[in-house]
Image: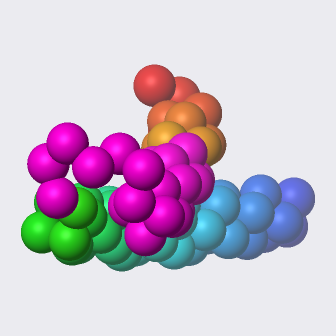
Amino acid sequence: MDWLTPLEEKVRAAAERIRELQDEKKALESRVASLERQLAAAAAPGDPGDPQAARWEEEKREIRDRVERLTRHLEDLAGV
């Protein structure tokens, strides 16, 4: 059964990486929600030319894209 040892190690490592990615995903989702709240509070309605609002939007898009990539990666690992 020595041939199972490397497989078990790979499975454990993959499971640990999945847990890490899930934790990172949660943190990023929380960050996105926080930034969306800040953006809503900071941006005046009807003022799309505000440079700060544009920066917030760009950061929000970047974070959302990263969360979506992580989600797809987790789904691929989970076989969803």
Pick the front one: 19 or 41: 41
- Is there any visible trace of residue 15 in the rendered image? no
Pick the front one: 48 or 3: 48
In the displayed structure, 36 sits above or below 31; it is above
Q: Is residue 59 left or right of residue 42?
A: right
Figure disc tally: 0
Q: Is residue 75 left or right of residue 4?
A: left
| Residue at (35, 45) in percent of width and height | 48
| Residue at (43, 69) in percent of width and height | 52
Please provide percent x and percent y for residue 80: 46, 25
| Residue at (53, 29) in percent of width and height | 79
Pick the front one: 46 or 1: 46
Please provide percent x and percent y for residue 17: 61, 68
> Is 27 in the magenta?
no
Q: Which residues are magenta?
A: 44-67
Q: Main secondary structure of the magenta part?
A: helix
Q: Colour scheme used in the picture? A: rainbow
Q: Is residue 80 left or right of residue 65?
A: left
Q: Is residue 5 left or right of residue 18?
A: right
Quarter occupied by residue 34: bottom left
In the displayed structure, 11 sits above or below 31; it is above
- Is there any visible trace of residue 31 in the rendered image? yes
| Residue at (20, 42) in percent of width and height | 46
Pick the front one: 6 or 10: 10
Work out which quarter of the rendered image holds the N terminus and state it.
bottom right
> Is 45 in the magenta?
yes
Please provide percent x and percent y for residue 15: 55, 63
Please provide percent x and percent y for residue 40: 16, 60
